[in-house]
Amino acid sequence: MQHITLGDLNVSRIGLGAMGMSHGYTGSGTDEAESIRTIHRALDLGVTFLDTAEVYGPYTNEVLVGQALKGRREEVVLATKFGFLSHTGRPSGQLDSSPASIRTAVEGSLNRLSTDYIDLYYQHRVDPQVPIEETIGALAELITEGKIRQIGLSEAGPETIRRAHAVHPVAAVQTEYSLWTRDPEARVLPVLRELNIGLVPYSPLGHGFLTGKIRSTAEFDDTDWRKDNPRFTGENFQRNLRVADEVQTVADQAGATPAQVALAWLLAQGDDIAPIPGTKRVVRVEENTAADAVKLTRGQIEQLNNLTPASGNTHDEAGMRLLER
């Protein structure tokens, strides 16, 4: 597995997102033993970058990751996130990146992850009630205390990134980026490259859509957030099947799977990008990590650059308001 750097962190250029093991998707939380095997298999295959968050579950995903890493903590650059949950009494559903809430959040994450430090600590979404300078200042104190090593932001906009980085270097920004979600290319990615900040794409497989295996939403249960996602509903879903088919065409040419092609395309966008495809199955982590060896031709990359644009927003209206702030 090839590696890149995010700030001072050396990470495998394909990581593992753990959210779906406990949260958000059909079948989440139903087979912790398989999820732990998946994490162990990822480590065996050279994955050194693992991503979770306190809100996944909530809390249960961090506990699961902590269990899986017993005896193997030093093999991993461990990332988690704060800010969706308030620890200062704000009403449920309100973001909270106040210094007081961060203090409580980090102690909880350290305990659940069974570790005494977090390698990369992200603000999960920008809190409009707290100046980013205050949030980053609190995180810088945690670095001084040895509780975290690097600071990250998730779904932050260019101006927020600049202001945050002026207080303390930001190692990475996490955002949705894939063949069917290319929004960061316009505003965020140029700023990251100017400031030498790494990009960590989440949902690099389009929440599973780009694998070509989702041809209907009938099997989604009521816990699956995709059930009401604009890209997975109504006419948008039918239109987006064309996108999956176009990726399949390139995969056939490349002798790879659609998932591997989608990841290989991301990796070809630069050596400052480390996607974190999520899965809860060993077979999928084996497939995803093998994308590290897939080399697309210039013509194949051009085909993928010109895919039919996806129909529908990536989130519902409330979710969209939290992006690039």
Image (spheres, rainbow, N blue to C red):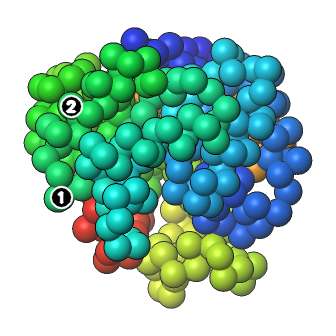
Q: Which mark is residue 109?
A: none
For disc 1, the marked residue is: 128
Answer with left or right where residue 97 lies relative to residue 19.
left
Q: Secondary structure at mark 1?
A: loop
Q: Residue at x 69, y 45 (%)?
A: 63
Q: Return the x and y of residue 112 as percentages of the image width and height.
A: 64, 41
Q: Secondary structure at mark 2?
A: helix
For disc 2, the marked residue is: 137
Residue at the bottom extreme?
Answer: 234
Please name the amino acid that badge 1 sits on.
Pro
Q: Return the x and y of residue 185 as percentages of the image width and height.
A: 27, 42
Answer with left or right where residue 26 lies relative to residue 106.
right
Q: Return the x and y of residue 170 as percentages of the image width and height.
A: 28, 26
Q: Is residue 119 above or below residue 9?
A: below
Q: How many numbered marks are there? A: 2
Q: Is residue 244 above or below residue 116?
A: below
Residue 73, quarter of picture: top right
Quarter of the figure that contains the N terminus: top right
Q: Return the x and y of residue 160 as percentages of the image width and height.
A: 15, 42
Residue 164, quarter of picture: top left
Task: Give the alpha-carbon distance from disc 2 to disc 1, as whole Å.
Answer: 16 Å
Please name the amino acid that badge 2 sits on.
Gly
Of the pair 309 and 110, the residue shown nearer to us:
110
Answer with left or right where residue 50 lies relative to residue 303.
right
Quarter of the figure that contains the C terminus: bottom left
Q: Residues within 10 Å of mark 1 (few under 14, many from 20)?
A: few
Of the pair 277 and 145, the residue shown nearer to us:
145
Sequence-first tag of 2 and 1: 1
Q: Residues within 10 Å of mark 2 (few under 14, many from 20)?
A: some
* Contact flag, marks 2 and 1 (Cβ < 8 Å): no
Answer with left or right where residue 158 lies relative to residue 38.
left
